[in-house]
Image (cartoon, rainbow, N blue to C red):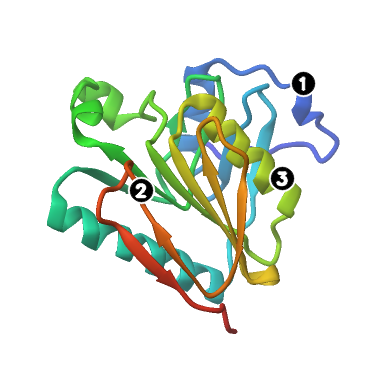
């Protein structure tokens, strides 16, 4: 594979890639974690540290255990890129799609970046993440059809809950979260984040 070299002064807000070009950019540069906003801006994500990586996986495990018991859908890791209906290409830290919606995709759609908005997403703010940028990303998820989203903010010991057609709810930790109608029976006790 050929590595991509980007000049430091490239204006990423005006790069206009087709879906296939973006896909090729990502698979040709597997060491880069790249997302694309709804307006086409390329976003290069830095790797997370050990604490964030551990927290992210633990949250995904909780979601996966619930899904393994209920068999109601499919769970996805932070490495999964979703081609959202609003034009963005995003990788939540964890995601879930109801089974019939996933099965409606063709095998080719499932193998590439699935052209579907998850029903549920989790984002976890790492030390290098800007909170406002993550909040904008959560709104982009809602605009694309995500039904429920949790944004964990260890720096402020909070979780933000995003729902369709509702204002964001902010809760202090510790708290009990519910998957509500989207993830029936999924309850998660979230303690204070410690280093």
Residue reaching furthest to the right? 9
Q: Residues within 10 Å of mark 1 (few under 14, many from 20)?
A: few
**Where is 191 relative to 165, above or below?**
below
User: Which of these two is toward me, 178 or 143?
Assistant: 178
Which mark is on residue 133?
Answer: 3
Q: Is residue 144 left or right of residue 41?
A: left
Q: Position of residue 157 (x, y in %)?
A: 64, 71
Q: Which residue is mark 1?
A: 14
User: Which of these two is toward me, 19 or 182?
Assistant: 182
**Where is 46 relative to 59, above or below?**
above
Q: Quadrant of residue 102?
A: top left
Secondary-structure class at tag 2: loop
User: Which of these two is toward me, 8 or 83?
Assistant: 83
Q: Residue at x 81, y 31 (%)?
A: 10
Q: Which residue is mark 2?
A: 180
Q: Residues within 10 Å of mark 3 (few under 14, many from 20)?
A: few
Q: What is the CA distance from the residue labelled 2 to the residue labelled 3?
A: 26 Å
Frontmost of labels 3 and 1 is 3
């Amino acid at each position: 594979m050929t590595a991509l070299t980007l000049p430091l002064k490239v204006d990423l807000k005006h790069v206009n890639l087709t879906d296939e070009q973006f896909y090729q950019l990502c698979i040709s540069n597997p060491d880069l974690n790249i997302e694309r906003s709804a307006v086409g801006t390329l976003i290069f994500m830095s790797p997370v540290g050990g604490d964030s990586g551990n927290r992210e996986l633990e949250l995904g495990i909780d979601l996966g255990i619930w899904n393994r018991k209920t068999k109601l859908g499919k769970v996805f890791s932070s490495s999964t890129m979703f081609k959202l209906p609003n034009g963005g290409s995003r990788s939540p830290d964890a995601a879930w799609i109801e089974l019939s919606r996933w099965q409606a995709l063709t095998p080719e759609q499932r193998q590439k970046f699935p052209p579907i908005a998850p029903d549920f997403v989790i984002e976890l703010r790492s030390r290098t993440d800007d909170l406002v940028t993550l909040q904008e990303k959560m709104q982009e998820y809602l605009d694309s059809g995500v039904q429920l989203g949790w944004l964990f903010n260890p720096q402020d010991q909070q979780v933000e809950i995003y729902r369709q057609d509702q204002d964001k709810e902010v809760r202090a930790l510790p708290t009990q979260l519910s998957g509500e109608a989207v993830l029936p029976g999924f309850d998660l006790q979230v303690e204070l984040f410690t280093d």
